[in-house]
Image: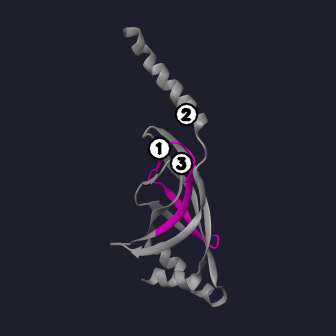
């Protein structure tokens, strides 16, 4: 009976090594929508709706991470995820990523945006970085995020001003 207990750690190691080969990449399929909200203090929250496909047979938790936000290839600033996101197994769905932005970064970008609004109708919003993931609370992985969306500039300025 005691000999069988020695097999447990060996089985756990084998499972953890083989589980890496079972992993399929989580696909970021694009940005579907966005919203801005003013928070207490000097922060705003940008809620961005991503379409994500998780082909794996297990759910994945996107841990709080920091990403870079760009407007027309000009860095707006770094944004921290406000909360973790749970991506369901074997499912393609829309998930909301709440990003906390510093109001000073938004104010710096607002003036050039007003100037661009005179000559352009759209602007490209890009989010880049790595999202830290956990599977079963133990196994970790990083997912690359590099998603862009063309936004109507006048609509964006209206949402920022609220």
Mark 3 or 1: in front is 3
In the rendered structure, does residue 145 fall within the stretch colored magenta? no
Q: Is residue 119 above or below residue 77?
A: below
Return the x and y of residue 73 as percentages of the image width and height. Answer: 64, 70
Task: Give the magenta-colored segment's residue range.
Answer: 47-76
Give the x, y percent position of residue 31.
Answer: 57, 66
Main SS, magenta residues: strand
Residue 71 among those drawn in magenta: yes
- According to the image, label 1 marks what residue? 134
Which of the two discs, 1 and 2, labels the residue nearer the N terminus?
2
Where in the figure is residue 85, as x and y percent of width and height?
44, 55
Seen at 48% across and 63% down, the residue is: 79
Instruction: Name which quarter of the figure residue 21 lies in.
Output: top right
Residue 58 or residue 45, whichever sits in front: 58
Q: Residue furthest right?
A: 119
Write the residue at 50% across / 41% down. Answer: 140
Give the quarter of the figure containing the C terminus: bottom left
The residue under label 2 is 19
| Contact (Cβ within 8 Å) of mark 3 with mark 1 | no
- Looking at the rendered structure, the secondary structure element under dot 1 is strand
Q: Looking at the image, is mark 3 or mark 1 earlier in the sequence?
A: 3
């Amino acid at each position: 009976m005691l000999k069988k207990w020695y097999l447990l750690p060996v089985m756990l190691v084998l499972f953890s090594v083989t589980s890496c080969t079972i992993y399929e990449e989580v696909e970021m399929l694009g940005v579907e929508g966005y919203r801005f909200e003013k928070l207490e203090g000097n922060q705003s929250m940008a809620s961005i709706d991503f379409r994500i496909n998780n082909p794996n047979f297990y759910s994945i938790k996107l841990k709080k991470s920091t990403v870079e936000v760009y407007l027309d290839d000009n860095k707006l600033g770094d944004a921290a995820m406000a909360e973790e996101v749970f991506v369901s197994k074997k499912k393609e769905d829309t998930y909301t990523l709440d990003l906390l932005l510093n109001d000073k970064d938004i104010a710096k970008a607002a003036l050039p945006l007003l100037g661009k609004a005179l000559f352009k109708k759209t602007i490209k919003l890009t989010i880049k970085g790595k999202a830290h993931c956990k599977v079963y609370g133990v196994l970790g992985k990083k997912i690359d995020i590099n998603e862009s969306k063309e936004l109507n500039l006048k609509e964006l300025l209206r949402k920022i001003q609220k």
